[in-house]
Amino acid sequence: MKFIGTRGGGAVSGAEAVVRGMAESGGLYVPETIPSVTAEELESMLSMSYPERAALVIGKFFDELPQKELLETLEAAYGKFEGDDPAPLVKIEDGLFILELFHGPTCAFKDMALSVLPYLLKKSCEALGVKEKILVLTATSGDTGKAALEAFAGADGVKAAVFYPEEGVSKMQKMQMVTQDGENVDVAGVRGNFDDCQAAVKKIFRSQECRDKLKERGVLLTSANSVNVGRLVPQIAYYFSAYCDLVTSGQIAAGSEVDFAVPTGNFGNILAGYYAKRMGLPVGTLVCASNRNNVLTDFFNKGTYDKKRPFFRTMSPSMDILVSSNLERLLFEISGRDSALTVERMRSLANSGRYSLRAEELKALSQIFFAGYASEEDTVECVYEFFEEFNYPLDTHTGVAMHVARGYCRKRAEDVNAEQRPMVVVSTASPYKCPQAVYYALTGNDVKDSFKGIKRIHLITAMNVPESLKALRYKPARFKTVVAPDKIFEEVLNFVAE
Ligand SMILES: *Cc1c(COP(=O)(O)O)cnc(C)c1O
């Protein structure tokens, strides 16, 4: 399978797409053709384990990988998750399910793909005969950073540098990153919000000068952000797996449609759901849930993307984003793969902060996506009421999605013409990952210290506390550097010189 850039340029191999991270033209890579999964294949997946299902899906895109080795790698990677299923589907009530994606080493869904990325990168470097040292450069809204650090720490021939918005992540997220072990990792805060951080990092990726300077030092740049297809592809697998679990548990008949609601920031997770649907998975509606930074809600409802708006810091910090990178891939697909139009729109976004869809594109999107948002009050109320009703503690990101999902389900229930479909809400983080916000939502009280928050949530919910979070308490902070966005590259150069 080859990959092409959303802004044009020739097709490249999967290995090259993974190593480069972003396309030469400045766009993002997408598969040259979207592979399909037949009804027979889907049926064969029913009896498979999660790693087997994932191997089948990932193998469709990276068909040059040895299947047996891929499966063994997935088994080892997901074997490090807590519990025996890395992506369990929990039934809440008839028609409502939660897909828990937070059982990995860093307690957020980013582990689902980042646990696999080192392998994809290693195989790709081998295939291309890359001799340089690899630098994995990552901008994070809180969770990608830690998942990348955890995935690459101690790996041979790789260094990982992570930049996070200094004031824009939860205390727990920050603690997870600055205490990271490993000689081959670097972490620094950036003055500004995630958009500033992501824009500065993307600029380095697009700069030939930066790439050349790194090359002089024997370093090749790659990305662990969701712009990398190596992130996107493993994420498609859990949509298939959740669907299979619904069938095997007798909740749906094979072939009938299911809706998914996804707490969205950079549009990576939900985009994987879109590709799953395009591959033939019977997905009804994809519910795109935003927090108060509701640029995507407006985009899907009005057809105009307009980033010129106030930026809010919320209790779901991993979704505090105004420029959703992966939306470029959806734009490319929905325009009928028109790279010239995609270039024009991305230019317009850079120059004037906005672009608009054509009427037929908006209509096509509205048949696949429903978009809504939750205010801070909505999120608190949803987390509180959900616990009261079902005794299930949602994290605040998932609370955003649950609020929007339930609104959507109510609307559908009122429509006599609409057939009712099961709703799967994708849970992206453990409630212990933003303990202060979750404790506030559950009780209306503040707690100053994250670990006290964890303890109190545990007392209320009796939910197991992940070992990896407990262990943080006694780990010293190793990384204290904070830089301005335009000094990121300097920090990178210092780090590679070490
Ligand atoms: C990254 C993240 C999101 C947003 O996912 P995208 O793929 O960026 O849309 C939502 N919730 C949590 C907990 C996250 O870490």
Image (cartoon, helix red, strand yellow):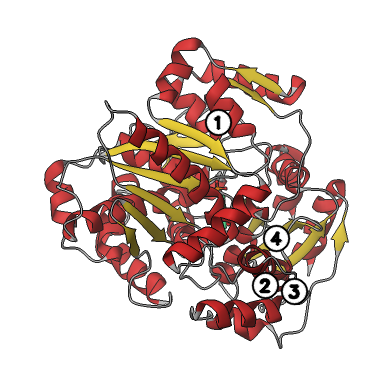
Separation (CA) of disc 2 from disc 1: 30 Å
Q: Give the CA separation, mark 3 to mark 1.
A: 40 Å
The answer to whether residue 394 is above or below residue 342 is below
Asked if residue 132 shows in the view, the reply is no
> Can you say whether 143 is above or below 18 in the image?
below
* Cα–Cα span, label 4 and label 1: 23 Å
Q: Residues within 10 Å of mark 3 (few under 14, many from 20)?
A: some
Q: Which residue is mark 4?
A: 162
Quick check: marks 4 and 3 in contact, CB under 8 Å? no
Q: Which residue is mark 1?
A: 328
Say whether disc 4 or disc 1 marks the residue closer to the N-terminus: 4
Which comes sooner in the sequence, label 2 or label 1?
2
Q: In the visual, does 119 lie left or right of 183?
A: left
Q: Amino acid at mark 2?
A: Gln
Q: Earlier in the sequence, mark 2 or mark 4?
A: 4
Q: Look at the numbered disc 2 and give the secondary structure of its residue.
A: helix
The amino acid pointed to by label 4 is Val
